[in-house]
Image (tube, grey):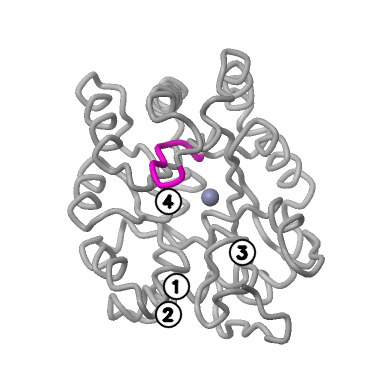
């Protein structure tokens, strides 16, 4: 799909931007041309990104995320944070040992710069794990997040109803934090997004918001109050326009911020500041 003759366009004139979801460790193995953490962070910094959260999807990437963040935190003035947890694709790998690992990591969260459990949730689009296992493992980790008093990063695809049912069940038994986390790369309907916001969730927007043929996501953004919106890349996937089709990096998150500004009718500076402040509130990075 990717076209090696294309030259990426870099965003200009931004500052103070927070990419709340970048799988930097995947960029190292997934892209066409070799990239290094150093290059990724340098480009992010020169495009105005100063904070990045690196999410995990299994035990191995949890360790890689922690390692990466500890090694590179502060490089080029970028604050790095991470999460630990098991993605629905990998739900069958979740066992007692994995749970003990997550508990141990989160109990040392400050030392490891861990700000969330995730990504966790349900994915019925790919169905890489049986749905009943996905539901069980999602619920288990969401309960863990409550017990450990830490937000979680929700991944939901084609499973909005079951997802919401589990969240409501947890809410009913008092096992959902007041600010439970973020619905990352929101692909649900505006109606479901409203329900998630009522439950206290933040809503994450990525490259698809910028896709010309995507009418749905701007409609979801429309119903989100400014104070719940965060900007993310999900890099190295879902590259925003004008670089769609190339490998994604945190340096492109300003294109998402620009689109948020345009749809919400605010300035780029406001959109940068508000989404970054929201991200810091969401992940309890600072009281803003
Ligand atoms: Zn992700």
Q: Which residue is mark 4?
A: 184
- Which disc number belongs to residue 50? 3
- How many residues crowd mark 1 within 10 Å: few (<14), some (14–19), many (20+)? many
* Label 1 or label 2, whichever comes before in sequence order: 1
* Left or right for 139, reference 63: left
Q: CA distance from mark 3 to mark 2?
A: 16 Å
Determine crowd level at label 3: few under 14, some 14-19, many 20+ residues with C-alpha closer than 10 A. Answer: many
Q: Which residue is mark 2?
A: 268
Q: Position of residue 20 (x, y in %)?
A: 52, 55
Instruction: Confirm or deny contact between disc 1 and disc 2 (CB under 8 A).
Output: yes
The quarter of the picture where residue 216 lies is bottom left
Return the disc, 3 or 2, that comes first in the chain's sequence.
3
User: 104 and 249: which one is in front?
Assistant: 249
Question: Do the numbered discs 3 and 2 sit on residues whose CB atoms are within 8 Å?
Answer: no
Q: What element does badge 2 sit on?
A: helix
Mark 1 vs mark 2, CA separation in Å: 7 Å
Q: Residue at x 65, y 68 (%)?
A: 247
Give SS at disc 3.
strand
Q: Sequence-wise, which precedes: disc 4 or disc 1?
A: 4
Q: Earlier in the sequence, mark 1 or mark 3?
A: 3
């Amino acid at each position: 799909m990717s076209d090696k003759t294309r030259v990426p366009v870099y965003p200009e004139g931004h500052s103070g931007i927070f990419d709340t979801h970048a799988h930097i460790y995947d960029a190292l193995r997934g892209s066409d041309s070799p990239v290094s953490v150093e290059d990724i962070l340098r480009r992010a910094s020169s495009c105005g990104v100063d904070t990045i959260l690196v999410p995990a999807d299994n035990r191995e990437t949890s360790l890689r995320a922690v390692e990466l963040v500890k090694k590179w935190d502060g490089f080029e003035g970028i604050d790095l944070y991470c999460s630990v947890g098991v993605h629905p694709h990998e739900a069958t790998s979740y066992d007692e040992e994995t749970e003990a690992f997550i508990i141990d990591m989160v109990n040392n969260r400050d030392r490891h710069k861990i700000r969330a459990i995730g990504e966790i949730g349900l994915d019925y689009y790919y169905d890489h794990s049986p749905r009943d296992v996905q539901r069980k493992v999602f619920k288990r980790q969401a309960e863990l997040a409550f017990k450990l008093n830490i937000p979680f990063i929700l991944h939901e695809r084609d499973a909005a109803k079951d997802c919401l049912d589990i969240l409501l069940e947890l809410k009913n038994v008092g096992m959902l934090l007041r600010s439970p986390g973020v619905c990352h790369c929101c692909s649900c309907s505006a109606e479901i997004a409203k329900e998630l916001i009522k439950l206290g969730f933040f809503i994450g927007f990525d490259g698809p918001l910028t896709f010309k043929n995507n009418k749905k996501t701007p409609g979801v953004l429309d119903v989100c109050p400014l104070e719940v919106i965060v900007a993310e890349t999900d890099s190295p996937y879902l590259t925003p326009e004008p670089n769609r089709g190339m490998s994604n990096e945190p340096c492109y998150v300003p294109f998402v911020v620009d689109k948020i500004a345009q749809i919400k009718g605010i300035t780029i500076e406001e959109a940068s500041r508000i989404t970054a402040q929201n991200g810091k509130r969401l992940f309890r990075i600072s009281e803003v």
